[in-house]
């Protein structure tokens, strides 16, 4: 009950531009009938002589108003920064990307995405994508909106077209590719020089984890997370 009352009060405060506007929401037609003075009715309410509930002193109103404004500005800043904010994400893969977006933008995490699917020509392609780098170099809102599909490119960390057998590998600002290695494909994080091993039969490496995902949008999805600072990630379902 207290939580509901507080939420109702915050909603009223948000809608009222001034404390006088707030008091006006508490002044009734009966008050005006007997007092015959709107200003006097406001003064009585402010002094606490009459209230129909959800009363606030001026200082408390100003405090709540400032908190509401700070929250609004914070949400606006976040919405401008995070492409996934406010999106209804149905697929496990998109939810996983959303869970990691802030950490990859801020540098707390450097995730590598392995994707296997068919391109627009129907050719099967696969590859490893530096998620943090892609976030900084392109608009991800179309991906989270479902208007565009994320697919590996020849310019990503690793790319392979199963039809044409075209294969490429490229370093990114975050990872060096180690392709000529008996252990298979490796990626070295340029910040801490830790090795990330994508072989599913072995551990991915220090400060790294491997998360295979079921997706309705792709044939195969695996996300490798490398933590460069301490960060907790919401578990995928």
Image (cartoon, grey):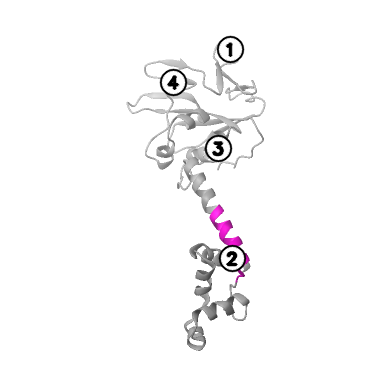
Q: Which residue is mark 4?
A: 155
Q: Is residue 82 visible?
A: no
What whole-number distance in Å separates the C-alpha atoms at marks 3 and 2? 37 Å
**Do the numbered discs 1 and 4 sit on residues whose CB atoms are within 8 Å?**
no
Residue 157 is one of the magenta-drawn residues: no
- Count the numbered circles shown: 4
Return the disc, 3 or 2, that comes first in the chain's sequence.
2
Q: Nearer the viewer, residue 20 or 135?
A: 20
Magenta stretch in the rendered image: 56-70
In the rendered image of this protein, does residue 115 appear above or below residue 20? above
Return the disc, 2 or 1, that comes first in the chain's sequence.
2
In the rendered image of this protein, does residue 200 appear above or below residue 47? above
Which of the 4 image quarters holds residue 188? Answer: top right
Q: Nearer the viewer, mark 1 or mark 4?
A: 4
Q: Nearer the viewer, mark 4 or mark 2?
A: 2
Q: Which residue is mark 2?
A: 61
């Amino acid at each position: 009950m207290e939580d509901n009352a507080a939420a109702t009060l915050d909603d009223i405060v948000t809608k009222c531009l001034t404390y006088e506007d707030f008091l006006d929401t508490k002044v009734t037609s009966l008050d005006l009938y007997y007092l015959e003075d709107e200003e006097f009715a406001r003064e009585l309410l402010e002094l606490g002589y009459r209230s129909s509930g959800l009363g606030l002193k001026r200082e408390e109103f100003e405090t709540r108003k400032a908190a509401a404004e700070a929250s609004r500005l914070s949400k606006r800043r976040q919405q401008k920064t995070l492409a996934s904010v406010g999106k209804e994400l149905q697929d496990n893969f998109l939810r996983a990307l959303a869970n990691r977006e802030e950490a990859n933008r801020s540098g707390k995490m450097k995730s590598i995405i392995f994707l296997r699917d068919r391109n627009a020509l129907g050719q099967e392609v696969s590859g490893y994508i530096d998620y943090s780098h892609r976030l900084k170099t392109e608009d991800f809102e179309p991906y989270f909106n479902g208007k565009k599909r994320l697919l590996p490119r020849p310019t990503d960390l690793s790319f392979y077209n199963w039809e044409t057998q075209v294969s490429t590998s490229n370093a990114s600002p975050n990872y060096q590719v180690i392709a000529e290695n008996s252990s298979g494909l490796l990626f070295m994080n340029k910040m801490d020089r830790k090795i990330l091993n994508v072989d599913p039969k072995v551990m991915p490496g220090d400060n790294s984890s491997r998360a295979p995902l079921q997706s309705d949008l792709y044939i195969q999805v695996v996300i490798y997370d490398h933590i460069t600072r301490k960060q907790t990630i919401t578990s995928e379902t």
